Amino acid sequence: MPAALDRNSDAFEEIRPPSLVTTATLTATGQLPKFADDAYAIERDDLWCIPTAEVPLTSLYGGEILEEAELPIRMMAYTPCYRREAGSAGRDTRGMLRAHEFDKVEILAVTTPAQGAAMLLELRDRAEALIAGLGLPYRIIEICTGDMGQSHHRSFDIEVYAPGCDNWLEVSSVSWFSDYQARRADIRFRTAGEKGTTIANTLNGSALAVPRVGGDHGELPPARRQRRGARGAAPVHARAGSDRAEMSTDPLADLARHRFEYETAGLDVADVDADPMAQWQQWFRDAGEAVCTEPNAFVLSTLGADGWPQSRYLLLRGADQRGFTFFTNYHSAKSQEMDADGRVAMLFTWLQLHRQVRVLGRATRVPDGESDEYFASRPRGSQIGAWSSPQSQPIPDRAWLEDRVEQMAGTFADGDVPRPAFWGGWLVEPEVYEFWQGRPSRLHDRVRYTLVEDPDGEAVWQLQRLAP
């Protein structure tokens, strides 16, 4: 994995740590006693084969007091790793999936507590850039608290799709341990001018494990094969620019330098469906397959009475040949603005796919029957909430709102909750669509549909390619 080392050499110092460590070292990072059955032990010498370079790298600063100005410390190592994989058996764990010895590049940082959050995202982005550069379909999952071990403060897993077992396999795990490991290893730092010391924080990530990314990945399913290279589709993620300057630990300080290269397949007029709604529906399905967060979320922009544009996020509830449907309080600011001027703009963004769709159209209220049907499908708590909140109006405090909820819950305690007359749906009938696909060097692809009249007076969609 020389490429992995080269890609991180701008900020991380390469270390060649030992492959054998003591019980105390393995305990400091949390591998013992929990993972004793998965580790190879040399009992006669009280030594263990390292399961990951995280173990010896973390302990390099064990028992030391560092100066705050030295932090963050960034290290990386390319080492063999040894795991017994106790209890792993069966077809899905054969071969390279559960190797007892494998090579891996590990990146690790020692930070102050304040630097931890930004460093976690940096490690994640570096691991992601390596995987994106391989051209493999992948996804990033943030691990929920209930699935993390006691040593972890926050973690991300990066998974690639493996056609051989038709499954997503973890190829990198990036974790922030807060002060858990540093406390056990006694890694501290001193702030200039202050008395005493503070426990440091540690973070690490795989970048990468060779067996699961180094071989032939075979045939991808059609949808995922498209994201790998077919025109009109995109990979699940993009890569960080290889020429990006070293980032600081303050995200605000790096706003001007924060960028990614979008290594995505192209989008052209010849690739898209003649029907813009059909094209939008396909992209929405792609967003669902890519596990995009809230793929039905969109920004709705209206024109306020004072002339200022107003924007907010909403959730889409319908998309068909009529247009786009959503529901809200008719007394809300956005509803009053749409009643006054039905022209609106919608923006759908799927960041994982580096795609967005802009829509211009006119909003009208949907029939009461359609609003009744949707309201009846909502959870009871949301139904009560619709009755309780005078949307967009000033209220004294949170307690006032909670009292209203309790009052309305009592009012409807004995039966179904009817739809309030002041609550219902809106339909946006599009007149313009613009599909945007991120591409390298900011030379993005843009295709616009505009509703026009043909010579016979029929409404038709005109397609144009726009400059980025």
Image (spheres, rainbow, N blue to C red):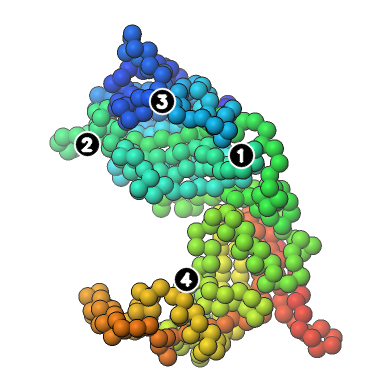
Residue extending furthest toward the right: 455
Residue 72 visible here: no
Please name the amino acid that badge 1 sits on. Cys
- What is the CA distance from the residue labelled 4 to the residue labelled 2? 41 Å
Disc 3 is placed on an element classified as helix
Nearest the viewer among 139 and 40 is 40
Foreground tag (4 vs 2):
4
Q: Amino acid at mark 2?
A: Thr
Instruction: First in sequence, mark 1 or 4: give its number.
Output: 1
Residue, disc 1: 165
Task: Kindly check if marks 2 and 1 are in contact, taking CB atoms under 8 A apart as contact.
Answer: no
Q: Position of residue 30 (x, y in %)?
A: 32, 31
- Could you tell me which residue is drawn at 31 percent across and 83 percent down? 414
Can you tell which quarter of the image residue 269 is in?
bottom right
Q: Residues within 10 Å of mark 2 (few under 14, many from 20)?
A: some
Q: Circle 4 sits on which residue?
A: 313
Does residue 307 appear left or right of residue 382 in this picture? right
Q: CA distance from mark 3 to mark 4?
A: 47 Å
Q: x%, y% of residue 26?
A: 33, 24
Residue 315, position in %: x, y? 49, 71
Callout 4, which amino acid?
A: Tyr
* Residue 38's disc number: 3
Q: CA distance from mark 1 to mark 3?
A: 24 Å
Residue identifier under label 2: 198
